[in-house]
Image (cartoon, rainbow, N blue to C red):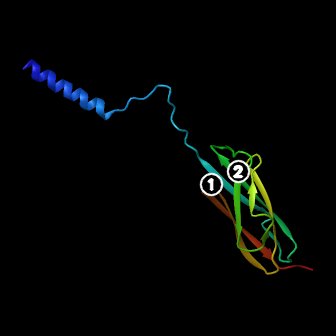
Amino acid sequence: MIARSFLMISLAGLLIWSCTSPTDSNDEPEPIVSSSLTIEAQPAAIPADGMSKMVILAEYRLNGEAAPDSTRIILLNTVGTLGHGEVYTQDGIAIDTLTSDTVVTLGMVFAIASGVRDSVEIAFEPVTQ
């Protein structure tokens, strides 16, 4: 009877040990990275004269801090002409310009960085004399 009890306890201990994995107390968990990307157009509306420009600002943050310098941000637009379209951060900010079309219209500018996206609506307004 004692041998049977010892065998049952040994098997239970083996089962419990096999279901757990030993960890080194010096191991630290991987940090969870939260990221945010914000895009702005300044000003949001410009004349549709083919010459006016707006500034496109993209701010990229990781864990609430500015993304490392030289982090790539891709900009895409539905109207107008971007100065570069591929910009790189400095202190978490990347800047481009967008030149207006000659057609009065609404459009969008999209920013993409490491799978994170944001967009802003822009407008080309009638030219006033």
Look at label 2 and name its amino acid. Answer: Thr
Q: CA distance from mark 2 to mark 1?
A: 9 Å
Q: Residue 127, located in which quarter of the rendered image?
A: bottom right
Q: Residue beneath label 1, please?
A: 114
Considering the numbered disc 2 on the image, is that residue within a helix, a strand or a loop?
A: loop
Residue drawn at x 62%, y 43% is 63
> Considering only vertical position in the picture, is 70 above or below 48?
above
Q: Residue 19, located in which quarter of the rendered image?
A: top left
Residue drawn at x 74%, y 49% is 70
> Considering only vertical position in the picture, is 107 above or below 84?
below
Considering the numbered disc 1 on the image, is that residue within a helix, a strand or a loop?
A: loop
Residue count near mark 2 (Cα–Cα under 10 Å), binned few <14, some 14–19, many ≥20: some
Residue drawn at x 71%, y 63% is 75
Look at label 1 and name its amino acid. Answer: Ser
Residue drawn at x 75%, y 53% is 88
Taking the view exactly as shown, the residue that stands out farthest to the left is 1
Provide residue 100's location: percent of width, then percent of height: 82, 73
Label at residue 71:
2
Are discs 2 and 1 less than 8 Å apart at CB? Answer: yes
